[in-house]
Amino acid sequence: MGYAFTDFFEVFYTSKVSWFGVNYIPNGSATVANGLSALGMTCYFKPEAPSFFVAGGLGVSTWSTPFESGAETLIGFGLFAGAGYEFSKHMNVEMDLMLGQPNKAKNGIETKYDALSVKLTVNALGY
């Protein structure tokens, strides 16, 4: 969801998630969801496709193991930066770097984690 103020600039809400497996001891392996819910913006280099673009946004980062019983979700600050190419009207390919700092507070001590993901996506846009 968003709004394009001009043919070169848009602001939007985005939800990005990277899923991957991790192996750790003593619990074995788990599936992790590194998520980002953010307010973003895109700047296009041309007013219509085909065009390169850059994008970025700030929001809330999450780190969870949704298929593990009793697992908690860590929440913190997150951001993304990316670039891409709109190769035809309504279709693009984009590469994003997502960085989050979900944290965990226990006994009054806050522990911050760094969650880093690189995503390559093909997207269909409605406008």
Image (tube, helix red, strand yellow):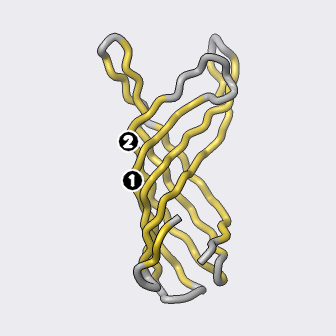
Q: Where is residue 71 in the image (x, y as percent from the top left)?
A: 59, 21
Residue at 40% x, 36% y: name it. Answer: 76
Q: Where is residue 48 in the image (x, y as percent from the top left)?
A: 55, 88
Q: In this view, does 67 lie to the left or right of 53?
A: right
Q: Is residue 67 above or below residue 8?
A: above
Q: Which amino acid does label 2 sit on?
A: Phe
Q: In this view, does 23 lie to the left or right of 43?
A: right
Nearer the observer, 44 or 2: 2
Quadrant of the rendering where the C terminus is positioned: bottom right
Secondary structure beneath disc 2? strand
Q: Circle 1 is placed at which residue position?
A: 58
Q: Is residue 97 above or below residue 113?
A: below
Looking at the image, which residue sits at the far left? Answer: 108
Residue at 54% x, 52% y: name it. Answer: 15
* Pointer 1 local density, CA inside 10 Å: few below 14, some 14–19, many at least 20: many
Q: In this view, does 53 lie above or below 123?
A: below
In which image quadrant can residue 30 be found?
A: top right
Q: Circle 2 is placed at which residue position?
A: 77
How many marks overall?
2
Secondary structure beneath disc 1? strand
Marks 2 and 1, Cα distance to the nearest angstrom? 8 Å
Q: Which amino acid does label 1 sit on?
A: Leu
Answer whether labels 2 and 1 touch (C-beta < 8 Å). Answer: yes
